[in-house]
Amino acid sequence: DDGTAEAHQDARRPAVRNCGNLKNARMGLLSVRSLFTEYANEGGGAVKAVQNVSFEVPEGKLFTLLGPSGCGKTTTLRMIAGLELPSSGRMLLDGEDVTFKRASQRDIGFVFQLFALYPHMNVRSNIGFPLKCQGVARREIDARVGEVAKLLRIEHLIDRPVSGLSGGDSQRVALGRAIVREPAAFLMDEPLSNLDAKLRVETRANIARLHQRLGTTTIYVTHDQVEAMTM
């Protein structure tokens, strides 16, 4: 794991900054500086998972991390999200050092590879759960969930249990749960890897469309070169 993932920055500017009532006052300048992490192995040695990774994502841009499995992409993303701590290096969001802040203290939305939906909740409850945890009023939760469902074109699924959703619909719910928080940045960890070829193409286009519409700083991790170049 040598941390040599290639980075590709989307040069397109978002066409629309406002989506209904969804706020986007902060778009998030994200800086990663000399990020390094290692783990102890069973033999008493150390495995270098990420080695001196540095990059900067200007606010409102979509930035892809491209590399083969095991090169440190997901580990880097998890450190930015606050799910893992680095051995050294710094991470800044809008100039604020968030390196050792809890994940809940970072204004970041994470889209996981395996969707990570709550199976006992319906679509509406899954999308609104982050707001409920923040103590947002029920009326505002309902309004924001409705806006996100309209944006993602899943209004017809809003009261359905997530257990019966297709892979593509499950991914849209996972995206909605990240979007509804209106974070300064999105992190997406190979969000299309569990979809079939047709759904990958469709969902990739949807993610690119959402980025252009919301204009939120996004880091997108993939091992697929075609996917990285077409985002």
Image (spheres, helix red, strand yellow):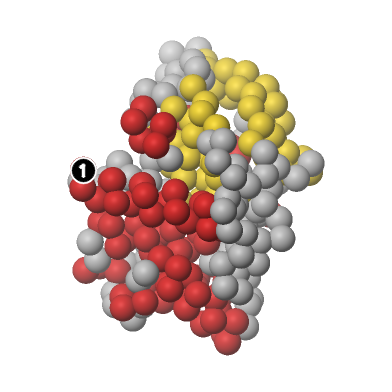
**Horizontal arrangement in the rendering, residue 57 relative to residue 119 (left or right):** right
Residue positioned most to the bottom: 139
For residue 163, above or below residue 15 = below
Res 206 quadrant in image: bottom left
**Horizontal arrangement in the rendering, residue 52 relative to residue 49 (left or right):** right
Residue at (63% x, 47% y) in the render? 60
Res 143 quadrant in image: bottom right
Can residue 127 be seen here? The reply is no
For residue 147, above or below residue 18 = below
Relative depth, front residue between 83 and 216: 216
Residue carrying label 1: 197
Relative depth, front residue between 157 and 62: 62
Q: Secondary structure at mark 1?
A: helix
Question: The C terminus is located in which quarter?
Answer: top left
Label 1: how many Cα within 10 Å (few below 14, some 14–19, many 20+): few
**Horizontal arrangement in the rendering, residue 121 relative to residue 58 (left or right):** left
Residue at (67% x, 39% y) in the render? 58
For residue 103, above or below residue 154 = above
For residue 55, above or below residue 204 = above
Res 89 quadrant in image: top right
Rendering coords of residue 166 (x, y %): 23, 61
Say which amino acid is labelled 1: Ala
**Horizontal arrangement in the rendering, residue 206 relative to residue 180 (left or right):** left
Residue at (39% x, 40% y) in the render? 190
